[in-house]
Amino acid sequence: MDNKIWTKDFIIYSIINFLLILVYFLLNSTITTYAQIEYNASSKMMGLIAGIFIVGALIGRLLIGFFKITKKMFLMNILFFNLTLILYFIKLDETFLIIVRFLNGISIGITTTIVGTIIALVIPEHRKGEGVSYFAVSTALATGLGPFIGISLTQNSNFMNIFYISFLFGVVSLIISFLLNVPSNDNRKDLSFKNLLDKRTLPIGFIIFLSAFAFSGIVSYINLYAIEIDLVKTASFFFIVYTMAVLISRPFTGKIVDIHGPNIIMYPAFLFFSLGLITLSISHHSWIMILSALLIGLGFGNISSITQTIAVSKASPQNVGLATSTFMIFMDLGNGIGPYALGFIIPILGYSGMYKVLSIVIIFTIFLYIILNNKKEVKAPNFNH
């Protein structure tokens, strides 16, 4: 039996996932600024343009569960993803941008769900939790680097370069997709409501929903917040520090989770995240914003990885794909509803007030985690080794 995790396919799937999520957050972190500058969009319209992407992603994730995954299908969806990126170069009006975002969301939803499902199949069964934990790092890194690249480009060049870079990443993902093997599988479900979501994933799904909701306020609005408080250059480095915090902490936290279970990391991560949001809300100096990035990296960076590991480890073998889809749906909901809902709060409380509110949301999430994930549920899974 092959015990290796770091196979050629695992590495390529991780790279593709990294590139897809990188484009996801690169565009999501800059699209509100683009809409404001190019179309003079209101805060509510900016939220809709940011959030409609997630509606498309949700539809894509729900649909993919009813089709057999093949290499041809995978390549077709990567190609579709690249075609949606080309549409960003066509500048018409806000309505057209909303349509482009919707189609781009569908393509991301389908393709990342396929990747997440196949990853669970190519990892040795008795090392699934460990492998998924490593794979989740590609998502966490892209979550930080995407906004860094996007915000840096908005400061130093025009928005077309953001779309060029996104398309370049899309083309690279398409090219390396031809090197992949797609394992034989047919996890299609009958079209019914019960097969849309994995009920065992719902508790951790609510946790990642609220966490992603809070993080979306950073991704979508930190650039505009930084302009307001005159810390634009610092804002670009925010996501580099965030990424470094994830890179440094994740190998240690992953091993601790394997031995002691997720609670020993999840509770401090929630507190770091909440404290980071409070710190961000009072960022009047560069060092304070950088400190908030470090805290949020230790917080959300670990929450996003560990919750995905929990979701997959709880799923039965035949439901790994559905569990992956369910987890991503809840993360997408948080990322999608967040910018739109917060668009109503910002005119009332301002950006600083919004981050204070999100800090309270994370405190509430701690109590929800305690209620929904009791000791029996969060017992350390047998990941090893």
Image (tube, helix red, strand yellow):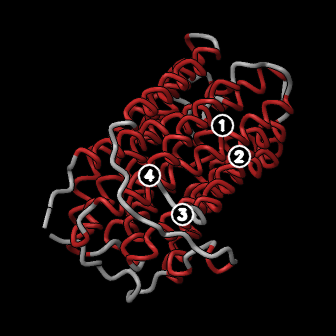
Give the SS element for disc 2. helix
N-terminal label among 1 and 2: 1
**Where does label 2 land, which residue?**
339
User: In the rendering, at what x and y percent does residue 54 appear?
Assistant: 67, 49
Q: Nearer the viewer, mark 4 or mark 2?
A: 4
Task: Locate residue 260: give its quadrant.
Answer: bottom left
Tell me how many marks there are.
4
Left or right, residue 354 beside residue 109: right
Marking on residue 221? 1
In three-dimensional space, the C-alpha distance between marks 4 and 2, rounded to whole angstroms, equals 26 Å
Q: Amino acid at mark 1?
A: Tyr
**331 or 15, which is in the foreground?**
15
Residue drawn at 76 percent across, 42 percent down? 47
In three-dimensional space, the C-alpha distance between marks 1 and 2, rounded to whole angstroms, equals 8 Å
Give the SS element for disc 4. helix
Marking on residue 55? none
**7 or 228, which is in the foreground?**
7
**Where does label 4 land, which residue?**
115
Q: Nearer the viewer, mark 1 or mark 4?
A: 4
**Crowd class of label 4 (few under 14; some 14 to 19; many from 20; radius 10 Å):** many
Left or right, residue 382 beside residue 294: left
